[in-house]
Amino acid sequence: MGFTEYFPPAPDSPAPLTVGVSRRVRFEEIDLMGIVWHGRYVSYFEDGRVALGDRYGMGYRDFIHRGVRAPIVRMHIDYHAPLYFDETMEIVTRMHWNEAMRLDYSFQINGPEARLVARGYSMQLLTDREDNLLLSPPDWIEEFKDRWRRGEWS
């Protein structure tokens, strides 16, 4: 399974932006069965979104400073294998090209020995401070997309 199953690329669209983050499972994240509680994976996805935003200039502070909100409107997780206390995981996050005013992210969490643990995606719409849906990109987002199209983010 590849990451494109969630967001198939359109012809001539630039490659997804990708970042990987490593972290260890903390004791507070496991449940009574000794595995990571399923609800924690949402925060792991968040770790990936934050790292990607920081890497490519689309972090939460950038949105707040510019008066743009990005509420999550859809999230999906496919669980494949458990994670255990003190295991190291890698969270691979990809932002997929989209012509609409939407942010599409896919996630893959790998455990020890590159074992596939979970995959999923999230979708965020863009709104102004009053929660009005943005139908066209603000200048700073258009500049970001222009740089992406030109391949400056590789």
Image (tube, helix red, strand yellow):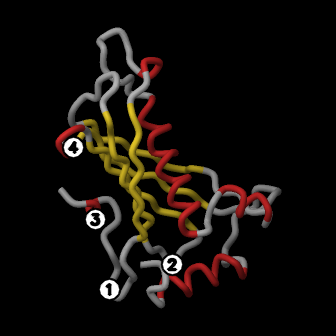
State the separation of the CA atoms marked 4 and 2.
30 Å
Q: Nearer the viewer, residue 87 or 76?
A: 87
Q: Amino acid at mark 1?
A: Pro
Q: Nearer the viewer, residue 30 or 10?
A: 30
| Residue ID at (79%, 62%) | 65
Q: Is residue 6 left or right of residue 126?
A: left
State which mark lies toward you, 3 or 4. Answer: 4
State the separation of the CA atoms marked 3 and 2.
16 Å
- Within 10 Å of the Cα at label 1, are there few (<14), some (14-19), or many (20+) other Cα atoms? few
Q: Amino acid at mark 4?
A: Leu
The dot on residue 99 is: 2
State the separation of the CA atoms marked 3 and 4.
16 Å
Residue marked by disc 4: 116
State the separation of the CA atoms marked 4 and 1.
29 Å
Q: Secondary structure at mark 3?
A: helix
Q: Earlier in the sequence, mark 3 or mark 4?
A: 3
Q: Is residue 26 above or below residue 120?
A: above
Q: Nearer the viewer, residue 102 or 41?
A: 41
State which mark lies toward you, 4 or 1. Answer: 4
Residue marked by disc 1: 11
Q: Amino acid at mark 2?
A: Glu
